[in-house]
Amino acid sequence: MSEAIPTRDDIALHVHQHLERLQRAGVQWVPVANQSLPPPEPATVSAGSSLFAANDEPAAMAAPAADRRVALAVLSEEVKACTACHELASTRTQTVFGVGPMDPEICFIGEAPGADEDRQGEPFVGAAGQLLNKIIAACGMKREQVYICNILRCRPPGNRTPKSEEATNCRHFLERTLELIRPQYICCLGACAAQNLLQTTNSIGKMRGRFHQFKGIPVLCTYHPSYLLRSESVEPKRQVWEDMKMLLTRMGKPIPENKKKD
């Protein structure tokens, strides 16, 4: 027998449970949204009930944007309190969550924060971030219109590649973020992001140029901006633009005139 679609009380209870976990972890405050959820009725959700809709869709998918925004803020505080990766927790300046609107057309996922991101607390703000901004602009969009995050929420020492166990520890934060923001498309930047999101060992060269799926969301994989900065060849840059044109076409968006001749 299928279960009923979660109500606002179901979602509110889920948020309250998040707050209780944060309190036990030592978090003393969380941001307050302009709209508050009503207190859940004690009998609304039984101990064995599920927070999934009848079609196995997460409750976040059925929740209003305002409610999901509150849950996202709670998740951000949970990330700040996380010490699952002892090396990362002991060397980070701060955690780097994600930036962007709810219900974005595109979510860009990178590898991990670098030195600039660790210092400022925002993903893709260094040299690679500046190039990503140019790529977004070339697609006819603005940075504030897309969501940007990373596989990891902490900077690996020396900007080394994330370890598999670190990506595993952070995966539930990534998946929950995607459930809450509800992007229409995902663009993985680099092999680390693509391999971890899609759980594969294929190279980025084999994954780019076609669409994949993550929980029903179309995923395009392409080269990381930092790789483009290091490469002396123009070929990777051309391939990234080919990938972006493929994404724009799939989205039903026009390809900007100034790029059609590239």
Image (cartoon, rainbow, N blue to C red):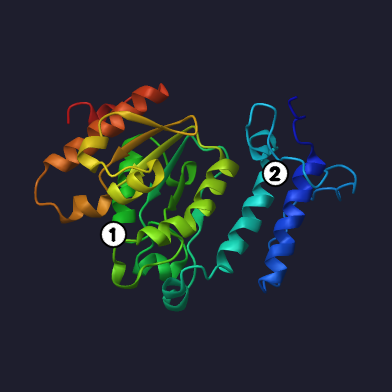
Amino acid on which the number 1 mark rests in the picture: Ala
Can residue 138 be seen here? The reply is yes
Residue lying farthest bottom? 90
Task: Please give the name of the residue rendered at 51% of the width and 37% of the height, measured from the top-left corner.
Answer: 183
Tell which tag, 2 or 1, sits nearer the viewer: 2
What residue is shown with label 2? 66
Amino acid type shown at disc 2: Ala
Q: Is residue 201 above or below residue 139?
A: below
Point out the image quarter for the C terminus: top left
Q: How many marks?
A: 2
Percent position (x, y) of residue 47? 80, 47
Classify mark 1: helix, strand or loop.
helix
Q: Quadrant of residue 66?
A: top right
Report whether 154 appears left or right of 33: left
Whole-percent x, y for residue 3 in the image: 75, 30
Which residue, given by chain and number where applicable, does mark 1 sit on? Answer: 127
User: Can residue 133 be seen in this snapshot?
Assistant: no
Locate the N terminus and report the quarter of the image it occupies.
top right
* Whole-percent x, y for residue 246 in the image: 30, 27
Determine whether the residue tagged by mark 2 lies in a helix, strand or loop: helix
